[in-house]
Amino acid sequence: MPANRKLLVLAGDGIGPEAMRQVLRVVDWFDKRRAVRFEVTEDLVGGAAIDKHGTPLTDETMGRALSADAVLLGAVGGPKWDDLPFAKKPERGLLRLRKELDLFANLRPAVVFDPLVDASSLKPELVRGLDLMIVRELTGGVYFGSPRGIETLPGGGRRGINTQVYTDEEIRRVARVGFELARRRRNKVTSVEKANVMESGVLWREEVQALRDRDYADVELEHMYADNCAMQLVRKPKQFDVIVTDNLFGDLLSDCAAMLTGSLGMLPSASLGAADAGGRRRALYEPVHGTAPDIAGKDIANPLATLLSFAMLLRYSFDLADDADFIEGAVEDVLAGGFRTADIMGPGLRQVSTTAMGDEILKALDRRAA
Ligand code: NAD
């Protein structure tokens, strides 16, 4: 069994380290029980790195991230560092990682675990069994395009400017990620833009269609306007398999899809970069939630979003789909057993601490392995 899978663990701030501790127990379990070995390096990011080194991400840590096969991150930030100048804030550490790893595709699954079906704001029949994936372009579009800024007009008024801009190559590389994912899932891609009112949307649609016709003719492709997609997500979300969209629409639609599942403490994510000559993709995995300063240090945070991020890491960085299924199955078992952290607690269920949730996950893994 290869032991040289290099994993950089950056637990970060707030509830990051508490949640990560439970995940590292699972990493250890995989090492001992499934002979899935990692060379784990732990390091600092965000406020924790500022406190120790005076910077949210040292060059050494950045170097470790660049040479790792995958990075697993907790979360960064908190009130302690809120007053720092923008360039020194904990979030800069995360932004530097994303930028220097060139992570252009953000994957946000929206999966409804059956025992949590009532946590959704939609009717159970609309979301039971939901399993969709949003692929958001992460490094281009209106958040980065120029010209940008706020200018003063001759008459004294002001004008704010941002520019939506995409090249054909930027569109193709993120669409490719979507098509590849669809092949491992239910083989359907919905490409989302506003080609009715935006030229960048016209280009998006043409490029995605041409790529599909050339390289992915086996994958079903449909095009949808972003406003309709938002509506369809809350009307009939199970029609989707993989949604591929730009940075701005992806930002909005992935949050909308997240709430179909009802609970921030359950949502993982992955950000992928380009594949190198050997097929290795730079990748960073992290829960969607932040550092939850209101509950940090109390051993009550939900560690499952971080654990499910680790499952994504197994699936997408190491092609260990069976092992990822194993973790997701254990999560389902624990939820079905009625164990809940405070954030997903309901009547008649058993409220457990972060650590106790880790205990239950390990027991469920043991049962599945028996
Ligand atoms: P948040 O996600 O940290 O918390 C929002 C609410 O959800 C809080 O009430 C919190 O207690 C709860 N919550 C979040 N995760 C939970 C979990 N795993 N278990 C139980 N409850 C959970 O968002 P926020 O309050 O807007 O931000 C707090 C800090 O986190 C800020 O400094 C912000 O900048 C940072 N942040 C970081 C990231 C990141 O590192 N990627 C993302 C979002 C926010």
Image (cartoon, helix red, strand yellow):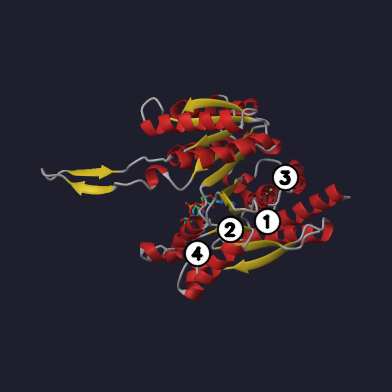
- Does the residue at mark 1 contact the one at mark 2 (Cβ under 8 Å)? no
- Please tell me how crowded label 4 is: few (under 14), some (14-19), or many (20+) other residues with Cα within 10 Å: many
Between the C-alphas of marks 3 and 1, the distance is 19 Å
In screen coordinates, is 251 left or right of 268?
Answer: left
Q: What's the amino acid at mark 1? A: Ser
Q: Is mark 2 within 8 Å of ligand 1?
A: yes
* Upstream in sequence: badge 1 or badge 2: 2
**Marking on residue 46:** 4
* Upstream in sequence: badge 2 or badge 4: 4
**Marking on residue 353:** 1
Closer mark to the observer between disc 1 and disc 4? 4
Residue 335 visible here = yes
Q: Quadrant of the N terminus?
A: bottom right
Taking depth in this image into account, of 200 and 116 the one nearest to the observer is 200
- Does the residue at mark 4 contact the one at mark 3 (Cβ under 8 Å)? no
Between the C-alphas of marks 1 and 4, the distance is 25 Å
Instruction: Please name the residue that numbered disc 2 is placed on.
Output: 74
Q: Secondary structure at mark 3?
A: helix
- Please tell me how crowded label 2 is: few (under 14), some (14-19), or many (20+) other residues with Cα within 10 Å: many
* Upstream in sequence: badge 3 or badge 1: 3
Q: What residue is at 47 percent from the left and 60 percent from the top?
A: 96
